[in-house]
Image (tube, helix red, strand yellow):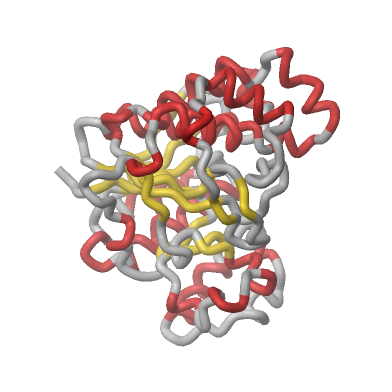
Amino acid sequence: MSEWIFACLAPPGDGAREALLLARSIRHFAGNRAGNPIWVLIPEAEDKLAPHIEADFRSLHVRLIPFALGEDAHTFPFAAKTLAAAEAEALAEDQAPLLVWMDRDSIILQEPGALRLPQDRVLGYRPVDHTLIGSLYDSPVDDFWQLVYSLCGVPAERLFPMIASVDEKRIRPYFNAGMLVVRPERHLLRSWAGNFERLFLAPEFEPFYQQDILYRIFMHQAILAGTILSACDQDELYQLSHLINYPLHMHRSYPPDRRPARMNDLISCRTDTLFQDPAWDADVVIDEPLRGWLNDQRAGL
């Protein structure tokens, strides 16, 4: 049995190429964890992977896992990620004590031992980068979050303060859905998907979707917060280092006192659309051999 499994969602096309870069980074940079299982979840409703992409995954010993995705979920923002996470968790329960669920635009940059959870913790997380629809801790709970907390069954005493990583606002718990380390036996990701399927088209939320598209875009992340807070006490949660899931595409706006001096210092990062910019590396120091490796990989995206 492996110590943990890495997993992500990869729709065919650009998503699959990003996931391939993630898999290559794990195999190249993850040290003693470089041989850990990597699972890539692929929606059955999507077109098939290009043969050369599938062959590249196979050469890296990546397990490709198709999963069902209904029409409503197919068209709703980030529904596929939520349901894929649940599928990965169910499959991982008898395979490894930990599942590392990542967004496909992630890159592992050094051995990620810091992902290991203390024995008494069931979830490793990063706060969201920006507050956006999040709930400010020092303000009354608004109608949207009252609804989330009520429908997910969140006890009021579990609403502790958290600091968003980029805008540094003090918010109620709002977890970044791009990096989650879970103990599969606790069923957190399956509960997340169950709550999401139950609520994302609930008529109570339609006025919020009409008011601001951000509610629709981040509904999956709001339901994640409600799910975690309904299932876990604060002392079961473990905040991961800011060097994990670092938003490289926000490097310029990251708080200067925590901004890493070099990309090489990161454990993992997210790139979003950064590699589409010809000057993607203008704001960050990257030492060799990482710079050369990234340039080689970026050329193939």
Q: Nearer the viewer, residue 22 or 56?
A: 22
Relative depth, front residue between 72 and 201: 201
Q: Quadrant of the N terminus?
A: top left
The residue under the point 63% across, 69% down is: 254
Residue at 84%, 26% in the rendered image: 210
Q: Quadrant of residue 11?
A: top right
| Up/down of 76 relative to 259, above or below | above
Residue at image point 58% right, 37% down: 221
Q: Is residue 52 visible?
A: no
User: For residue 248, which quarter of the picture?
Assistant: bottom right
Picture coordinates of residue 198, whole percent (x, y): 56, 15
In the image, residue 63 lies at what x, y percent? 33, 41
Seen in the image, is 120 located left or right of residue 287? left
Q: From what the image shows, is residue 107 above or below residue 4? A: below
Q: In this rendering, is residue 167 above or below 234?
A: below
Q: Is residue 265 placed above or below 177 in the rendered structure?
A: below
From the top left corner, tell me how far across and down residue 229 is, in percent: 47, 33
Q: Quadrant of residue 274?
A: bottom right
Q: Is 26 on the left-hand or right-hand side of 177?
A: left
- Residue 45 in sight from this viewpoint: yes
